[in-house]
Amino acid sequence: MTFQNIVATFSGAFIFPFLIRLLWGKMCDNWGNIGGWMAAGFIVGTTWTLNHGMGMIFQTGGAWVDMAWAAGIGLFVASVLSGDNFAKGVRNYIVALIGGVLGGFILSCFM
Protein backbone atom coordinates (compact mmCIF):
# COMPACT_ATOMS: atom_id res chain seq x y z
CA MET A 1 0.00 0.00 0.00
CA THR A 2 1.43 3.37 -0.97
CA PHE A 3 1.59 6.40 1.30
CA GLN A 4 -1.13 8.10 -0.77
CA ASN A 5 -3.41 5.08 -0.28
CA ILE A 6 -2.77 5.16 3.47
CA VAL A 7 -3.65 8.88 3.66
CA ALA A 8 -6.80 8.35 1.56
CA THR A 9 -7.88 5.38 3.70
CA PHE A 10 -7.43 7.24 6.99
CA SER A 11 -9.25 10.26 5.54
CA GLY A 12 -12.15 8.11 4.41
CA ALA A 13 -12.29 6.38 7.79
CA PHE A 14 -12.25 9.77 9.56
CA ILE A 15 -15.13 11.23 7.54
CA PHE A 16 -17.71 8.67 8.72
CA PRO A 17 -17.52 9.14 12.52
CA PHE A 18 -16.93 12.87 12.03
CA LEU A 19 -20.21 13.26 10.14
CA ILE A 20 -22.04 11.05 12.64
CA ARG A 21 -20.82 13.15 15.57
CA LEU A 22 -21.42 16.44 13.75
CA LEU A 23 -24.83 15.87 12.14
CA TRP A 24 -26.76 12.87 13.45
CA GLY A 25 -27.81 14.35 16.80
CA LYS A 26 -28.77 17.69 15.28
CA MET A 27 -30.91 16.02 12.63
CA CYS A 28 -32.69 13.98 15.33
CA ASP A 29 -33.19 17.06 17.49
CA ASN A 30 -34.61 19.11 14.63
CA TRP A 31 -36.75 16.50 12.89
CA GLY A 32 -37.36 13.79 15.50
CA ASN A 33 -37.44 10.16 14.48
CA ILE A 34 -37.57 10.91 10.77
CA GLY A 35 -34.37 12.93 11.24
CA GLY A 36 -32.66 9.77 12.48
CA TRP A 37 -33.76 7.89 9.36
CA MET A 38 -32.68 10.79 7.16
CA ALA A 39 -29.32 10.92 8.96
CA ALA A 40 -28.86 7.19 8.44
CA GLY A 41 -29.52 7.49 4.73
CA PHE A 42 -27.59 10.70 4.20
CA ILE A 43 -24.55 10.07 6.38
CA VAL A 44 -24.09 6.35 5.83
CA GLY A 45 -25.06 6.48 2.16
CA THR A 46 -22.87 9.44 1.29
CA THR A 47 -19.89 8.15 3.24
CA TRP A 48 -20.23 4.64 1.80
CA THR A 49 -20.31 6.11 -1.70
CA LEU A 50 -17.20 8.19 -1.03
CA ASN A 51 -15.29 5.36 0.60
CA HIS A 52 -16.24 2.42 -1.59
CA GLY A 53 -17.78 3.89 -4.72
CA MET A 54 -15.24 6.69 -5.24
CA GLY A 55 -12.39 4.60 -3.86
CA MET A 56 -11.19 6.52 -0.80
CA ILE A 57 -10.72 3.27 1.11
CA PHE A 58 -7.96 0.99 -0.17
CA GLN A 59 -7.92 -2.55 1.13
CA THR A 60 -5.40 -5.25 0.36
CA GLY A 61 -5.51 -8.95 1.04
CA GLY A 62 -8.48 -11.18 1.64
CA ALA A 63 -9.92 -9.35 4.65
CA TRP A 64 -12.80 -6.94 4.13
CA VAL A 65 -13.28 -4.25 6.80
CA ASP A 66 -16.73 -2.83 7.44
CA MET A 67 -17.33 0.90 8.08
CA ALA A 68 -18.68 0.06 11.54
CA TRP A 69 -15.08 -0.38 12.69
CA ALA A 70 -14.25 3.19 11.65
CA ALA A 71 -17.41 4.52 13.30
CA GLY A 72 -16.76 2.59 16.50
CA ILE A 73 -13.15 3.65 16.85
CA GLY A 74 -13.79 7.27 15.82
CA LEU A 75 -16.77 7.80 18.10
CA PHE A 76 -14.98 6.10 21.00
CA VAL A 77 -11.97 8.37 20.67
CA ALA A 78 -14.17 11.47 20.30
CA SER A 79 -16.17 10.53 23.41
CA VAL A 80 -13.08 9.91 25.52
CA LEU A 81 -11.48 13.17 24.38
CA SER A 82 -14.64 15.14 25.19
CA GLY A 83 -14.65 13.77 28.75
CA ASP A 84 -17.45 11.20 28.50
CA ASN A 85 -17.57 8.05 30.61
CA PHE A 86 -14.75 5.71 29.54
CA ALA A 87 -16.53 2.53 30.74
CA LYS A 88 -19.65 3.38 28.73
CA GLY A 89 -17.44 4.11 25.72
CA VAL A 90 -15.74 0.73 25.99
CA ARG A 91 -19.13 -1.00 26.14
CA ASN A 92 -20.31 0.86 23.03
CA TYR A 93 -16.99 0.17 21.29
CA ILE A 94 -17.35 -3.58 21.90
CA VAL A 95 -20.86 -3.52 20.45
CA ALA A 96 -19.56 -1.60 17.41
CA LEU A 97 -16.81 -4.21 16.96
CA ILE A 98 -19.36 -7.02 17.10
CA GLY A 99 -21.52 -5.17 14.55
CA GLY A 100 -18.52 -4.68 12.27
CA VAL A 101 -17.54 -8.33 12.45
CA LEU A 102 -21.13 -9.43 11.86
CA GLY A 103 -21.55 -7.01 8.94
CA GLY A 104 -18.29 -8.19 7.38
CA PHE A 105 -19.26 -11.84 7.82
CA ILE A 106 -22.70 -11.31 6.26
CA LEU A 107 -21.17 -9.48 3.30
CA SER A 108 -18.56 -12.21 2.87
CA CYS A 109 -21.41 -14.70 2.50
CA PHE A 110 -22.53 -12.85 -0.64
CA MET A 111 -19.07 -12.74 -2.22
Image: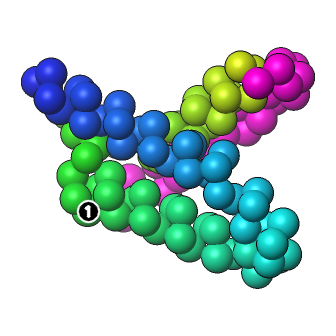
**Relative to 27, residue 86 above or below:** above
**Span highlighted in magenta in the image:** 82-111
Q: Quadrant of residue 7?
A: top left
The one of 102 and 55 positioned closer to us in this rendering:
55
Query: Left of 81 or right of it: where is 74?
Result: left
Q: Which residue is mark 1?
A: 53
Quadrant showing the N terminus: top left
| Figure check: 15 above or below 74 | below
In terms of image quadrants, where is residue 39? bottom right
Q: Give x and y (percent) for residue 46.
A: 43, 65
Residue 4: percent from left, percent from top = 14, 29
Q: Residues within 10 Å of mark 1 (few under 14, many from 20)?
A: few
Residue 5, position as x, y percentages in the image:
17, 32
**108 falls in the magenta region:** yes
Which residue occupies 56% across, 51% down?
Answer: 19
SS under mark 1:
helix
**Is 29 a magenta residue?**
no
Residue 87 appears left or right of 18:
right
Is any atom of residue 63 visible in this view?
Answer: no
Whole-percent x, y for residue 95 in the image: 73, 38
Residue at point 35%, 36% (across, down):
11
Q: Quadrant of residue 64?
A: top left
Image quadrant in which the C terminus is located: bottom left
| Residue 72 appearing in the image | yes
Q: Residue at x 85, y 75 (%)?
A: 32
Name the residue rendered at 49%, 57% in the picture: 106
Query: Is 29 above or below relative to 4?
Result: below
